[in-house]
Every structure is written in structure tokens, then in C-alpha cells.
Amino acid sequence: MLRLNLSDGDSVRLSNNTGEFIATCKSKKIKDLPTGLIFIAYGPSSSRLMESDTGGSGMPISKNLRVQVEKVAA
Amino acid sequence: MSENIKIVKNATCTFCGCVCDDMELTVDLDKKQIIKAKNACVLGRAWFAEHTIQEGPVALIDGKESKLEDAIEEAAQTLTKAKFPITYGLSDTTCEAQRQAVAITDFIRGTIDTTTSVCHGPSGLAFQGVGESTMTLGEVKNRADFVMYWGGNPAESHPRHFTRYSVTPKGMFTPNGKKDRTVVLVDVRRTASTPVADIFLQVKPGKDFELAWAMRALVKGHTVDASIEEETGISLEVLTDLVERMKNCNYGVLFMGMGLTMTRGRHFNSGAIMALATDLNEFTHFVAKPVRGHGNVTGADNVVSWQTGYPFGVNFSKGYPRFNPGEFTTVDTLSRGDADAALIIASDPAANFPQAAINHLHKIPVVSFDTKETATSQLAHVAFRTSTYGINTGGTAYRMDDVPITLRPAFESPFPSDEEILTALKKRVHELVIAKSRSQGAGTAKVAAPIR
Amino acid sequence: MTSYIRISNGKVYDPSNNVDGQIQDICIENGKIVETVPADARKIDASGMVIMPGGVDIHCHIAGPKVNLARKLQPEDHRHDPHPGTLHTRSGSGGTVPSTFATGYRYATLGYTTAMEAAVTPIGARHTLEELHDTPVIDKGFYVLLGNNIFLQQLLKEGRKEEFKQAVAWWINSTKAYTTKLVNPGGDEPWKGKKNSNVSDIDEKVTETDISPRQIIDAFIDAVNELGLPHPPHVHCNNLGHSGNFKTTLETMRTAGDRRVHLAHIQFHSYAGEIGKNPGSAAREIADYVNDHPNISCDVGQVMFGKSTIMTADAPLAYMLRGIAKGKWVNADTECESGCGIVPFKYQEHVYVHAMQWAIGLELFLLSKDPWRIILSTDHPNGGSFMNYPKLIKLLMDSSFRKEELSRANQKAINKTLLPELDREYSLNEIAIITRAGPARCLGLSNKGHLGVGADADITIYDDQQDKELMFNAPRYVFKSGIPVISNHEFCEDHTGKLLHVAPDYDESIVDSVRPFFENYYSIEFDNYAVDDSYLHDHEIIPTINQ
């Protein structure tokens, strides 16, 4: 978060080729959540970022999604 | 508190796949609510507390209150008219209801799929590929001296998994409980579960397969390069020590979380873990098991399997079951735009599917079954309000280890059960299918001898 | 409304009533066979046809936890063999482990109307009953696995024989089973607890429990006889599949003395030779013992060339077989009760061992002097699917067909057996015994396996054909409980069938002994363990001798 100049409570836009949504930041220790990782809950917000292609498995990739993070005005 | 109190002993919590059957429920029969759930975990307490009776219509057609019979008729007409109807959900209802749902889908030559496809479906595929050495949870309690969780956070998702089945309980050959066990956790981040572990492996995201495969290599005595640390985040030294512990335990268990199935690798990840457990049987007794989410998702797997031969993603359009994940699984049938009607039972795909699939749900007639209003019921053409399994209705639920348990309902609901409405719907659908077949002049029966 | 049917002009094979191919009328009133029916009864002309009681399968694996794992495991086995629905019947999929609906309908298409699932863990009884409810047409029951039950073994070790008997009765009642099943008794603890080993000698005391397989077998034979169950303990002996195991099999039978016992799939237990080396045939030794001891019954467990699925509570055996091809393998441990192993398999004519197994099964049939006690089975799907029964019947009835078939199998194996010299051909009457009358009698099902007045109207009518495989593959009519389920080769009505189970009397105070053990070592609540009557669908309690 330091790297992106973010602090707790800031709004960020998470986006990828599939879609985007706005989330609120909360920091974690690097020991708990390594650099480069964001944790979001599974549900309507993750739906926006999940690709529908299941690669023949029936399962859309629902974790380890690559996203762009941009700070947005609150 | 009213005077009209009932105690239900040995009741079952169907919130998660643990299906704990040692609940002692205190029920206020006047208020129709559970006021205390002894032995329940935090999730279970919320589950029992939330399911009160809320006034409301039993059925809605296009958002307008409707009589139950009319809604059943409309649902039956909708499903039989469709060319590519899909059935989905089923993980939060009884096996008895699931059996009716498969029958309906068979009659309308539709496609049936359960929440398994977006849960441990990949583990189901892996199972078909490599098999699995597995067990009931009591074996873990009685025998396991090595327990490893991979890609899951049971402390928050299955709070009693540790205490009731696999970490702290004292069993036949584990008289000292946790002291007799080595507990290992593999995850991409630290969670509430991490403190339970004797060993925590923080694997790099999306590198589960590589880690598991390196462990298989070590088990089989092959050389693994030290660059494995760069690749997976786990050093060769740590891995070598871990594998030695696994080979030398008396009874080892690998629990698989959805951190394996929902990420890069999917069924390959589950397959690698299952194969690892199988490999280890050359040295000691080793088993593996997916940690299942919903209360009766395991029942859904079992029912769909015994009725069709396949666990999920089954299509009846040719008059017999065919299985093809990626083609007949619900995310695919929706996001490709194949489905032209949907029967959705006890699940809420409109709240967690990829957006493209949700968009298609908005375009087709949906028949929904739920105990409450959901994103899916809001967009449904016909929405049934049903009673809650395990709280208002009896029946059977399967624990994550395939152990079936009979539910003990706590109090009556004014709403019918899924099974009751589905049974009526099946009857009506069957009548319509027979009528349609007669009007098309089709024969009444096929040759009795099986087709080879 | 009463339904009356009269079947006329057919050749009737009803060995229990000494009817051997005579032309006789069979009358049905509401699901039972009666002396006569009113003149306006529905008439079926069975000219040129053969009438037999519906077939009874005494040993198969068709429902429950292990069967469903085997189903899930093999999409490739279903894919080539779909089972389409009709307006009256549900669809399904076939292969060696068909879906429940396909299982019921396919038994019916062979003229079988009763089948017994041979191995169910007590904790899996509820699951099994749900599947059996979805297995149409046939009547069915199951045998409950108690031979590796830890609590029962503790009682034995402590010499508490009366409590042992009471606990067995409690378990049967709690699961709605038909009889007790022992599989590789004593072998589970070494498998689960001592790094995948097994027990190998019937008198070897297992370290963990300090009792031997023989003690377990002996205790069950006593208990079941005292309880008066209609079918004795159903025993899968130790050392299944191992060369030289016939000695264990003989010892198992000797343990019984003159008490009743049923030996399952005895072909798999009739191997000569040394352990670890290729087997020879000990069919002669086994058949002689069975012939001389009327207290013994067995089913053959014939191996048929082609695809099979090994599914067994004998987990160490499945692991051994897995070692051959290193293919997919399922092991499933059930707490305090059982093990289980599943391996997809294929019997091949050119393979010495497979040809030997095939030949030993046929030797046993042909050396048997009392068809009432050597029952036809393939231990479906272990030796092959039950769909092979018509071919197996042809192998027994047609010696020239048998010679053709054996000329294609591994000659090194065949020539070590008596098979080339055995010219016996089974008669239709004998076939009716080994597929109907015999299994019904062994099971103590007095209303099945015959066509006398009072019997269940489970009736099969075949076109009388020269080619017995064709004949037994496609009955023209099948009546189940008097309902014409198949008529002119077509399904015209669905039927659920009923569950057959026993309910021996027992002393309820035994619950006080079971409960503490249960609360310590099981993972479900004791009060949620016993199966209630809601799982029974249509059912019939077969009385014990004492009831």
C-alpha cells in the first residue's frame, strides 16, 4: 500500500479485462498478506472480475486474479 | 421468553459440510425461532438464529403474489417448453429434494448441475482421473497423527473441523488429542487457521501444483532442485523434512480446500494432492479428502451420481445422461447463452457467478427455490419460498465424508419444503411430457433390451 | 381393483415344486400366485415359451457408498453404454457399475426380480437404502458388514458372547439389513493401523485386537444361527485372490462344522499353488468339500472376460491389484467398521491368471453335485457385470460353445484344470435351480424362486430358443409382483420393488454397552446412527426361525 501511496480507508478501482469494481483498502502485515496480494471476499464483487471461460472444467478461475489497482477519489 | 419451549437434542447444523449432528436446540415454538443452539460454532449459531419465519407469499410470478398451484403450473409450462432448460444449485436442500430435481431434469431432457461445479468440481474431475485414498472423519479422530490442510481456512469456514474431527479430538490411537498430531497448513496468506499449525507453508499464489509435484518427486526418491524455493516459496530443506514426516507417520491425512480448485491448476492441483496421498501408501497409511462447503453439497454429488452415473454437469438432451464439464456446467451454459430456462434450487448464482453468466440469467425465465429473497429470486419468473432443511423439514444430508445423517427439524414453517413442491412439479412435468409425446405421435415405449 | 392374469401353454420350470418343463397354467391374483382365476382374467398365451420364477441374485454390489464411488470414478465406463429412458422409465447409464435406475431395469431385462447387495457398512446403510429406493422393479436387500467391527471384536476378546449376539442383532435392526457379512475378517486393523499390512492365516491373532479370523467366523456363525436369521453369515474368506488360498477356504468351512454358512464368490478362494506365484486350480478340493457338506452354500463369483470393476471391503486386496497396473485406485476407510478398495479391471483371455480364474469358476459349476447350493453369480461387478449372466448360462448349457470359448483362452492355464475333460451340460431345470430356486432357498425367501400357490408373482417368460444366451438375454414377459413390467420385450409399466430385511429380537439393554464405545470413537451421535423406518419405502420383514 505504501508503494501505491494508499492508506486505510482509501477507495481503489480494481480492474481487469473482464470488469472492474471499487473497493475500500485495509492494510495487513506483509507476513500475513505478502506484497502484491489483495484479499477480497467471494461474492458480487469478485463476480465482476471473474472470467466466464472455465477452460473446459466448469470452474471459473475465482482466486489468484490479476488486477490493476488505481486510487480513486473518495 | 414464552412458555412454549421445546428442546431438540442431536439436531444437525446444515450450514457447512461438517454437518455437526450434536446440536441441542432450544426452540420458542410461539415465536417460531431457535433461541439457543448449544454446541454450535459461530457460523452455526448465526444459521439457526437467522432462520426465523418471515411473512410473505409462498410463490411469486414476475414479482406478483401467486397461488402455489398456479406457480407450479407456470413453472412446469416454462420448463417443458424450453429447448435447453438447466437445473442448478441443490447443495442446500435434502437428498429427498435432490432426487426429485434430477427426475424433473430427466423428464424435460434438460441439463443438471450443482454448486459442486464451482466448488470442488475440479476435485471431482481429479477423482475420475486418479482415484482417491480417503476416509470418514472418525478415522481422523481415531488414528491420524499427521494432518495437513492445503488451501483452506477452516477456522473461519468450518470452525469445528479442528475440534470435532481432526486436530484436537482424542481417539482410539490418539489418546492425547492434538499432542499426538502434527498439523501442517499450506496457504498463500496467514489466516485465522494458521496458529493451529505446527508447520505453516506459505506457498506463492498459483504454485500449488508445483509444490505438490515436488513433494511427489521427493516421496518417490527423485532429486528436486533447490530452485523449488524460488518457484514455490518453500525451501527444499523444509520440503524434505515434511516429506520424511509424512512417510513416517502412522496415519496421514491431506485436507483439500477450495484454494486449490478455484485457482490456476484447478483439477490438476486436486489430482496432484490425491496422487500424493496414493503415493504415500507405499510407506504408510495415507488418505485425502476435499473439505466441502455447503451443508449438503456432498449429498448432491451422491444423488446425481447414483441417478445418472456422473457427479455434476449432466445433460439429458439425447434421452440419457451425458457428462461434459465445460459444456454442461452452469457457468458455461449460461455465459455461452445456451440455456433458455433455468430451475435454480437453494443457491444464488446471481450473487457469485461471473458477470457474463449473471447477465444471461437476466434474459431467460428462471424458476427459483429459496428460503429467503436472494439476487436470484429477484430476477426469477417464478419464485418459490420454501422452508429450511434441518430447521423446518427433515430429510437426509451427507457430511463432507459421505456419511448420511437424518435431520431433526426444530419447528414447523408455513412454507412447504423443497421436496414437496418439487414432487408436485415433477408430477405435472411428467404429465406434460407424456401429453407432448402423444401429440407428436411418438411410441409409448422403447425396446426393453439395453442398447449396446 | 383386483387384477387377475392367467398364463397358459408355457413350459414351466419350477424346481421347488418338481415341475420340470411340463405345460401348466400359472394364475396371478394381485401380485401372488393362486390356484385359479375367474374366466374373465387377462390371458397371456405362452405357447413356445419357457416360464420360470424371476431370477434371484444372492450376491452383487449394486448400491451404497462404495458402489457410488465406483460409479463416480468411471465416466469412461458409462459413456459407451447409455441407458435411454422411456415414457414409463427413467434414463441412466450402464457399464460395469450402472446408475440405480439402469441397474433395476437391466436386471428386469434378464428376467431377474430380486437382488442382494452384498456389502454395506452400518454407517452407510442409510445411503444404501436411498439408492435401493431408486433401484426400480426388483426386490432387494443388503448384508451388513460386521466382520471387522471393532466393538464386536472387543466383546469377543473379552469373552462376552451373549452380548456379542445381542449387539449383532441390534446392528441388524439398526441398519435394516438382511444378514451379516464378513469380509476378510480381522484384516482391517493391520491395513489401517500397521502401515498397510494384512492378516494371512485364519489362526493368526491380530495384534491390535488379539483375536483370530477363525474366532470371528465361529462367533458369527453361532450368533446368526441362534438368532435364527433366514440366511447364515455370508463370508468372504481371508486371502482372497492369493495362490494357495484354498486351504484357508477349507479351514473356514471346517470352522462351521455342521452349522450353516454361506461362502461368497468361492471361485476367488479356490486357488492352489504357492503365495506370490501363479495359481493353479483347487476347484476339485473345494467342490468335494461343498458336495459332502449340506450345511454349506456358496455362490461362484464367475469371472467373465472383459471389463469389470473390483469393489470390495477387502482393502488390502484392492491395493494389491492396484499395484499391477498402477492405475486409478480408491481406498475408503470407514470408522470402526470397515475398509474398502476400488480398482477398474479387465479380465483378458490370454492372461494366464485370468484364464485360470475363468476356468476354475466353470469347474466349480460342473463339479457340483447339488445345484441347490452352488449359486450362479459373477460377484457383480468384480468378476464382470451381471449382464454376463446369459452368456454364463450358455457356457454351462452348451459344451460345444464352452469348448470354443476355452480354445481361445490361455492354454497353459486351461490345461492345468479339469475343464477340457468336463462334458456336463446344465439342463433348464438346473439353470432354474442355480438362478432362482437355489438362491431363494439359501436366502430363506419362501415366497420367491418358485411358482407354487402363495408365491410372489415374480415371473419370467422367455422365448424357447436354441441359443441360450439369446434366450436369457431378452425375456418376452417379466411380471414383478404380478405387474407386467415387460410385455413383448417392451417396458410398459414402472415399479419400485420392495426392501427385504430381517428384524431379529434382541435385548434392548445392549444399547447401554454399545453407547459408551460409540460416543468415544465414532464421529456422529449415537442417537442419529440407527436408520428409521422412513428409509424403508415398500418393505417386507422376513421372519427369523424364532419369530
Image (spheres, coloured by chain):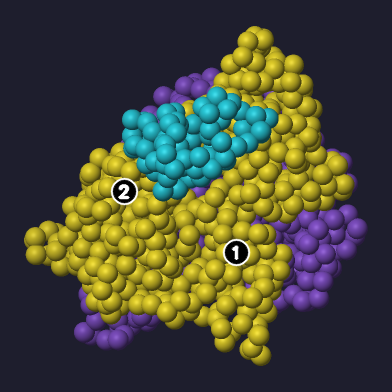
Chain colours: A cyan, B yellow, C purple
> Residue A45 sits in which quadrant?
top left
> What x and y, as percent, mark residue C454?
45, 78
Residue sitting farthest toward the bottom: B3
Q: Residues within 10 Å of mark 2 (few under 14, many from 20)?
A: many
In front here: C106 or C246?
C106
Quarter holding the N terminus of chain B is bottom right
Amino acid type shown at disc 1: Ala
Quarter holding the C terminus of chain B is top left
Q: Is residue C179 visible?
A: no
> Residue B448 sits in which quadrant?
bottom left
> What x and y, as percent, mark residue C338?
69, 49
Residue holding disc 1: B46
**How far is the residue under mark 2 from the one under mark 1?**
28 Å
> Residue C284 sits in which quadrant?
top right
Q: Secondary structure at mark 1?
A: helix
Q: Which mark is residue B358?
A: 2
Judge left or right: residue B1 versus residue C219: left
Report the residue at 50% width, 53% height from top. Answer: B297
Q: Is residue C277 visible?
A: yes
> What x and y, as percent, mark residue C423?
46, 37
Report the residue at 31% width, 48% height from top. Answer: B358
Query: Does B213 appear above or below C422?
Result: above
Q: How many marks?
A: 2
> What x and y, as percent, mark residue C505?
71, 76
Report the residue at 47% width, 56% height from top. Answer: B91
In front here: C189 or C410?
C189
